[in-house]
Amino acid sequence: MAQREWAEKDYYGDLGVSSTATAEEIKKAYRKIAREDHPDKKPGDAAAEERFKKASEAYSVVGDKEKRAEYDELKQMLASGAFSSGGSGFGGYSSGGGFSSYGGGFSGAGSSGFSGGTGGFNMSDLFGDGGGGLGDMFGGLFGDDMGGGQRGQRTQRAGRQQRSRGADVETELTLDFREATKGVTVPIRLTKPEPCETCHGSGAKPGTSPVTCSTCNGSGMTNEQRGAFGFSRPCPDCAGTGTVIKDKCPDCGGTGRVTKARTITVRVPAGVVDGQKVRLAGQGAAGQNGKPAGDLFVTVHVRPDKVFERSGNDLKLTVPVSFSELVLGGAVTVPTLDSKVRVRIPQGTQDGTTLRVRGRGVHKRNGTSGDLLVTVKVAVPKNLDEGAMSALRKFAEEEKRSGFDPREGWEGN
């Protein structure tokens, strides 16, 4: 991320706190947003997911004492005009000028440029090894070794270690509706890179070990000075690892990995929705030469159920009933995820009414459950004997005498 873009982020605003907030206030604000807007709490809510992402990014910076200090310093620089609003660099740098060959300063044709000569701005003050320079600050933020500072080198080494981890692996899994709502543990078989058992992931022939790279002396980086700037890049001889393998393992060819088929047990949590990913840390492809493995991401697909539908953590079903059950009232037995339950139908219930059974829906992570929503729908008989038809005619006559009009108040009248 560019310096200006990083500095223009309103991390305090994303957390809903002021820039003078204490570390404890920042932590409380982040936890509140995480509880309310986590994707697991509000599945399918894009706005909540975006608020959660912004809060997570903000907390990763201002929730860290050292990063927060660097972020605040960048914000102050931006407010004071230290970054230019146009162009590509620092405030006041004129595009009409270039680098001077003396004094270590910028020479510029415009009056706003850094001047050279004896009164010029010394580049070593800006990017040099001295404490407090921007090279030290930017090195910590962005991993750029802008002046050979130790913090920049440490950040680059950490970045190399992270990049050298194994690749993430993705697979898919299809579950029945009730397995997904209740949670299930299933085995899946994957073919992926695994640590070599012969060399135990080192890549070196048994009895030997990798040796320190003579080109970079084990740092994994080579440095080059170009005028006022110092540049670092991964060592070409050891690919940034800091070590080289003289005698390679015959089974893995020095990579420390072999491709194998392996069965992995995946625990799918209760309440997973169709398309949701389950992450298994460290179960991805093995890293090269003993580096950590990547992660495994399992995309869960859920088959539709013949009886239930899902609405958030509530379960919905439709139960057929007779006309007399709605008029006279009664009770019907309906299924749940675990067993069955009796649902009372009040006298005079209208067709299409939804009755709620508390706590018989999908189990939540906090220990509570959603509800079961039962919709009653009249089933009209197709074949009645003469006795039933005669009773129905008599009912219709009594219905008219009582003054009941099913279309009273209907707009089509």
Image: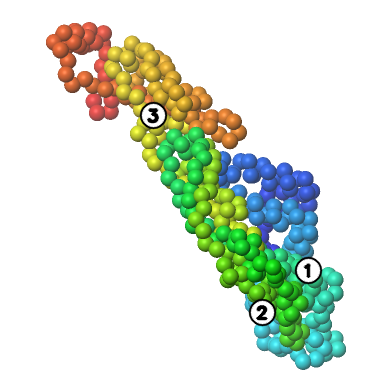
Q: Is residue 42 visible?
A: no
- Residue at horizontal 65 percent and vertical 69 percent from the top: 204
Decide if residue 137 is on the left or right side of residue 284.
right
* Front-most of residues 350 and 229: 229
Whichever of callouts 2 and 1 sits on the residue coming sooner in the sequence is: 1
- Residue at horizontal 42 percent and vertical 17 percent from the top: 342
> As drawn, which residue projects farthest toward the bottom?
101
* Front-most of residues 191 and 335: 191
Q: Quadrant of residue 309?
A: top left
* Quarter of the figure with the N terminus: bottom right
Cβ atoms at labels 2 and 3 below 8 Å apart = no
Residue with the mark numbered 3: 317
Decide if residue 290 is on the left or right side of residue 114.
left
Residue with the mark numbered 2: 237
Whichever of callouts 1 and 3 sits on the residue coming sooner in the sequence is: 1
Query: CA gap, disc 1 to disc 3?
Result: 61 Å
Query: CA gap, disc 2 to disc 1?
Result: 24 Å
* Quarter of the figure with the C terminus: top left
Neighbour class for label 3 at 10 Å: few (<14), some, many (≥20)?
some
Residue 346 placement (x, y as % from top left):
40, 14
Residue 390 placement (x, y as % from top left):
16, 9
Residue with the mark numbered 1: 151
